[in-house]
Image (cartoon, rainbow, N blue to C red):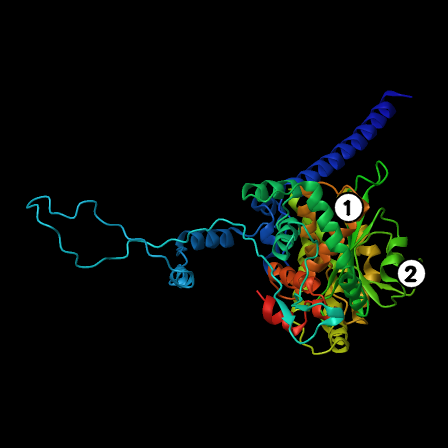
Amino acid sequence: MDKDQKIAELLKINAELQKQVEQQAETIKLLQNRIFGKKTEKLDKNQLSLFQEEDLESLVVEKDSRQKEAKIENKLSRVRHRKAKPSGCRAEFLDNLEQVTVVHDLAKQTCKECCHKLKPIGKRLAYREAVLKPAELICHNHYQTTYKCNHCHPKGGDKIIMAVPDKAPIFPHSYYSASVLSEIILDKYELALPLHRQCLKFNSIGLPLNTKQISRAVIELSKQLEGVYDYLTQKLLVNPVIHMDETPFRVLAEKERVTSYFWVMRTTKEFANHQIAVFRYANNRRQENIQDLVGDFKNAIMCDGYTGYSDKKYPQIDFGACLVHIRRKFVEIVKILKHGHSSTALKAVELLNKIFDKEDKLIYTTATEKAQKRLKYVKPYVDKFYEFLDGIQNPGGKLKQAIHYAQNARERLEKIYKIGEMPLSNNPVEQAIRPATLVRKNSLFAKSVAGAKANAIFHTLIETAKLNGLNASKYFNHIISLLELRKTVEIEAYLPWNPEIQAKCAK
């Protein structure tokens, strides 16, 4: 091998190594952005405002100097006015509270100069404040009134009649009243307060509870609400389109190094009979879980690009594609890179934003009409986006992956032209998962499978209650009080859209 060939070979190796370094740098920046960067993605025209200003300045095509000078002049001439604070809100809020008068008086009611007694002429309001009343425990003693009939003497004895309470405690001879149970559930699943911290709170007000007792009560309560949970699942699966996603969850009782999951289903925001979110525990992420979740479901599912949502495995189901997931991969490139092919990613994001913008402007009354309008008004923008991708020459690194993901999802994405109920985004189910993610971060794990199933039931009830505009605390107080009734209560009485619950538990 002569000297020139050796130099050429070394240059080629150097170029390949440099390419690997650039790809690794991209990966590092991407991971840093995922950990420390902003997580939200707005679906409006101002989407690009989420990106770092210095990134955008290096990506956007340079404009002529006149435009730059005009922009600088506009910035200099712009006057920022502070937004006026709403008046009267605080006073109105304080007026609705219980009023307590606190009078500050003089220690000596005599004049310092002449020593004569002062005459009161009135008082003025110095300031108002909202005072927090600490939690306190009250014991309710339930007595049964006893009666005697003087006319009846069965078998020679007295006839005694007692009033039977219409309710009985869920856990007799325990500290768990409806109010205590409701507080535990809401602290755990809405405020993400772990049980051992709840013990500290309850112990501070004198209630002697420990973690093991609370865990047992939570699991037993979930079993009594399992019928409501199953009914909500059935109601969800009659919808023409549902969302589906999954999130990891650790269970100590499962085998080592096995990652368990919550599989989550949610109704679409449009064209659903009721708003429902259902969590289901599984000790794996295998695609067979979909069959366990949906049974004979033969409609459509909006999901991400996970291979478990397989058309071959489930040919009876129409799987959609999330346009937000497609866009997210281009957004990540724009956020982490300052030059090169990231300008291509920026153009892709702009084209995708136009699709969302056109979708938001559609006017329709039925799902069929929406599908027709999409075919007429949205399809040209989708086609333009894919034409742009097809015209990109020799993409590499993360851009190549983003393009490949978008092209693979095209067939599923275009089902929106036939299925009007199919949304463009899988964000609604991801938003339902977020509270469960916070609980997972604070509590870390469940010890048993029964505990994991209890988590699924309570996440389902709380998220469904919130989707139906209910105050979760009022809702749980109400349904636990229904469990305490001695008579049998129909399942409809527990549902968040029940008119009685809507009247009593609305926010």
Q: Position of residue 246 (x, y in %)?
A: 78, 52
| Side of 252 where 119 appears, left or right | left
Q: Nearer the viewer, residue 355 or 133?
A: 133
Q: Residue furthest front?
A: 156
Give the mark nearer the N terminus: 1 vs 2. Answer: 1
**Which residue type carries mark 2?**
Tyr
Position of residue 275 relative to residue 104, above or below, is below
- Residue annotated with mark 1: 248
Q: In which image quadrant can residue 270 be found?
A: bottom right
> Residue at point 77% right, 45% down?
249
| Side of 214 where 141 appears, left or right | left
Residue 286 seen in the figure: yes
| Side of 84 where 457 appears, left or right | right
Q: Residues within 10 Å of mark 1 (few under 14, many from 20)?
A: some
In space, the residues marked 1 and 2 are separated at their CA atoms by: 23 Å
Classify mark 1: helix, strand or loop. Answer: strand
- Residue annotated with mark 2: 314
The residue mark sitting in front, 1 or 2, is 1
Q: Nearer the viewer, residue 280 or 215?
A: 215
Classify mark 2: helix, strand or loop. Answer: loop
Image quarter where the C terminus lies is bottom right
Position of residue 79 relative to residue 417, above or below, is above
